[in-house]
Image (tube, rainbow, N blue to C red):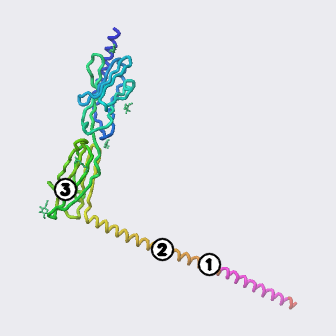
Amino acid sequence: MCLHKRALLRAGLLLFLLHLGACLDDCVLCIVGQPVVLPCLYPELNTFGNFSIEWRKNDQKLLRSQWREDGNVEICSLNYARIPYDAAQNGNFSLELPKVHPKQDKMNFSLFFSAGEHEATQLCALCLRVAASFSAPELQSEETADGNETTFLCLSGGGYPEPVVSWLISDSLQPPEGSVRTLAEPHPESHLYNITSYLTLNISKDSSVTCIIENPSMNETLTATRYGESRTRAVGRASEAMWIFSTVLCVVVGIMVMVGVAYQIHLDRVTKRRKKEKREEQRGYKRKFQFIEETEAMTEDKKETDV
Ligand SMILES: *[C@@H]1O[C@H](CO)[C@@H](O)[C@H](O)[C@H]1NC(C)=O
Ligand SMILES: *[C@@H]1O[C@H](CO)[C@@H](O)[C@H](O)[C@H]1NC(C)=O
Ligand SMILES: *[C@@H]1O[C@H](CO)[C@@H](O)[C@H](O)[C@H]1NC(C)=O
Ligand SMILES: *[C@@H]1O[C@H](CO)[C@@H](O)[C@H](O)[C@H]1NC(C)=O
Ligand SMILES: *[C@@H]1O[C@H](CO)[C@@H](O)[C@H](O)[C@H]1NC(C)=O
């Protein structure tokens, strides 16, 4: 009777878990060569005495783990897939994959739970989205035999998935139809793409040409630009102008400094002269004063002599 109740309770919990599992469909973005964790948290599971979980990759068994009431655990897995060793205690059944490969792109991973006679129930379902950065594009150009046409080559590699390659002429114009040919080759083992894009057209040497490689999965837009000759000439002219400007500036500053120094010297001289003059003036005043005193004394003397 008591056992029966427990079984009912578990059935109810299972329904509850099922309901939760339905919300978890999602894609996990991961970078080629890096480890990834596919999250799956179910703390309620350890209330079941005997239970097992199974991670599946596109319905293929990847890892199975069984817990018993007596604490016994059995895990069997393909060597690279793991779950935390304390999964049952913490309810963290997340799948750990050590290294992501482009082969796993868009694969579905799901966790199934089973206890007693109940059928296996899917609790977590996630898909992988795999991406890798492309190398900085390299732009080459060569004139074709007839001399008027130029072929531009844009090279990049090591990225995933296949990128969107486009070209721009003079920063804004789409190249004419039929002038672009792009080859995207996945490497047979790594599955990473090598990109070679050709742009062949009649173009003046003054126009700039830009190759653009977009990898939306990585939020990545890489560009390489060949600037036209007018631009390089303009840059040349600009730097020449800068050079002249800075030279003129140096000369002007130099002259100003010299004038300033000369003026300072002049000022010094003027103040010195003024001081001298003042001193002399004062001496002159004193002399005058003395002269007056002397004359007064003389007149007094005179008076005295008169008396
Ligand atoms: C758990 O498994 C063991 C061994 O298979 C069994 O003896 C026990 O009755 C099981 N317990 C439950 C609650 O099913
Ligand atoms: C669950 O385990 C994974 C892998 O060990 C870990 O990265 C993650 O942080 C854990 N989550 C929680 C909520 O503990
Ligand atoms: C990709 O490019 C690299 C370097 O440019 C080269 O070594 C490799 O062979 C290329 N792979 C393919 C599949 O073309
Ligand atoms: C480029 O110019 C050459 C000679 O002027 C002409 O034969 C060729 O058709 C032109 N190509 C394009 C794509 O306009
Ligand atoms: C790309 O950008 C979006 C929005 O800015 C962001 O949510 C997403 O995480 C980014 N992806 C990567 C791989 O950086």
Of mark 2 and mark 3, the one earlier in the sequence is: 3
Name the residue nearer the viewer: 282 or 136: 136
Q: What residue is shown at x 25% (from left), y 32% (from top)?
A: 108
**The C terminus, quarter of image:** bottom right
Q: What residue is shown at x 42% (from left), y 71% (from top)?
A: 249
Q: What residue would you read off at disc 3?
A: 199
Task: Using residue 296 as the reference point, say whether residue 201 is left or right of it.
Answer: left
**Which of the labelled discs sits on residue 272, or is there none?**
1
Q: What residue would you read off at disc 2?
A: 256
Q: Nearer the viewer, mark 2 or mark 1?
A: 2
- Residue 264 at x, y = what percent? 55, 75
Judged from the image, the secondary structure of the residue bearing numbered disc 2 is: helix
Q: Residue 294 colored magenta?
A: yes
Task: Using residue 129 as the reference point, say whether residue 85 is left or right of it.
Answer: right
- Residue 204 vertical position relative to residue 162 in the rendered view, above or below: below
- Residue 221 at x, y = what percent? 28, 49
Residue 123 visible in the picture: no
- Residue 95 vertical position relative to residue 256 in the rendered view, above or below: above
Q: What residue is shown at x 81% (from left), y 86% (from top)?
A: 297
